[in-house]
Amino acid sequence: MTRVIPESTSSPAGTPPAPKRPLPVSRADTFTESVIREMTRLALKHGAVNLAQGFPDFPCPDELKSAAGEAIDADVNQYAITWGSKELREEIVKRVKTYNGMAFDPETGITVTCGSTEAMLASLLAVITPGEEVIVPEPFYENYGPDAILSGAAPRYVPLGDDLSIDEESWKSAFSKKTKAIILNTPNNPSGKVFSKKELSFIADLCLDYNVIAVTDEIYEHILYDGHKHVSIGSLDGMQDRTITIGSFSKTYSVTGWRVGYALADPDLTNRIRKIHDFLTVGAPAPLQQACAAALRLPASYYRELAADYDKRRKILYNGLREAGFACELPEGAYYIFTDISESGKTDVEFARHLIEKAGVAAVPGSSFYHDGGETKLRFTFSKKTETLQEACRRLENAF
Ligand code: PLP
């Protein structure tokens, strides 16, 4: 309902202003603002090197910049078709066929969205009837908690082991008749885990047994190390019509501010996602959709170099963190290192504040990736220039 805002809040001279009545409670009161984005604001305030939020401080490929400029010059400035421009849908579907091994009809199987953030929320809204359970493996990307609440789902968290393995018995016991969906994220933020085909087959069997939909966020699918391979759960037998595969241009092409992503799903699910997407945002930015289609025509070498460059950055940050006294492992994919700070004797929030104010480096407190726990962890991103990472490592020498 629209709230009427009075034109003037000033009161007649001498009359004390009427006390402000508290707003009625809403679902927005049931979660906090993003800790990741808050850390970025604190980093700016204190002049800290921002290794908190996962966005590059280096430019996107020139091909994307010129394609975006050309699109604006050619007046591609009005709404695109709500579920995405035809050219972009066709390019995405082509790439998904070769890279992910899944076939979709560009007319009925894809919705272009404002980033994978919108794709995830629109997908959950399309799938969930309030009160149904959604399985969320933990640690998880912090948006999934509020996404579950906004869509009315009851999240059911299943922890990964300390070595990031799946404990099959606890996963089996999390699935029930109430389970409607599972949110997957591989390669994973924050842990860097890349789910293997064997693990995904185990999860797929549970989805088939319990009639569950997999909503899978594969935004880091091209950022893989040490021979790890990306597998889309939707490509496994029986899963195509019960999987929503979410992708984005943000990370693969270093354009997190462009806000272009997509959800791939069978026509019935896509129909629902498109309706919700239309009323959420109408559509993703039209000229940038044209530039994203150009991104998909980059040669195969682009993806090899992307992974190789991130591998170098991964090693710089890993070595710096180890030398500074952080306990951590090299991630298998994505661009984060999830560290253990038990040694510091501080909580994650205390240590994150201390790092920003005393060392001049921003990281994300581990508790933002758990529904309960994570206070002994901090997450650092290495999606930064070599010089930025070297400066951060120099500053981290005084971390403990
Ligand atoms: N999903 C994961 C796992 C992420 O790490 C991020 C950003 O860090 C997002 C989604 C947001 O992606 P987008 O920019 O496509 O909305």
Image (tube, rainbow, N blue to C red):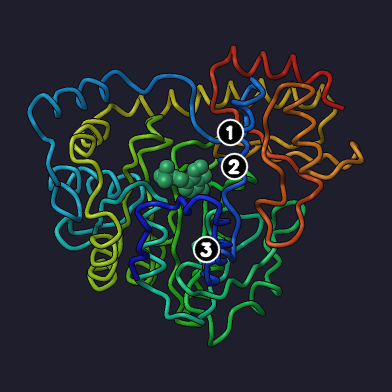
How crowded pointer 3 is (Cα within 10 Å; few <14, some 14-19, many 20+) is rated as few
Q: Position of residue 337 (x, y in %)?
A: 67, 36
Q: Residue furthest left?
A: 74
Q: Secondary structure at mark 1?
A: helix
**Mark seen at residue 36:** 2
**Position of 224 relative to 5 (above/below):** above
Q: Position of residue 27 (x, y in %)?
A: 52, 69
Residue 64 seen in the figure: yes
Asked whether the beta carbons under mark 2 and mark 3 sit within 8 Å of each other, the answer is: no
Residue 229 seen in the figure: no
In the picture, measured across the screen, residue 115 lies left or right of residue 337, that is: left
Q: Nearer the viewer, residue 200 or 83?
A: 83
Q: Secondary structure at mark 3?
A: helix
How crowded pointer 1 is (Cα within 10 Å; few <14, some 14-19, many 20+) is rated as many
Q: Position of residue 355 (x, y in %)?
A: 76, 29
| Sequence-first disc among 3 and 1 | 3
User: Residue at 83% across / 45% down in the picture?
Assistant: 347
Q: Is mark 2 within 8 Å of ligand 1?
A: yes
- Circle 1: residue type: Thr
- Circle 2: residue type: Ile
In the picture, measured across the screen, residue 59 lies left or right of residue 268, that is: right
Residue with the mark numbered 3 = 28
The quarter of the image holding the C terminus is top right
Asked whether the beta carbons under mark 2 and mark 1 sit within 8 Å of each other, the answer is: yes
Residue with the mark numbered 1 = 40
User: Residue at 41% across / 29% down in the picture?
Assistant: 254
Q: CA distance from mark 2 to mark 3?
A: 18 Å
Asked whether the beta carbons under mark 3 and mark 1 sit within 8 Å of each other, the answer is: no
**Position of 197 relative to 55 (above/below):** below
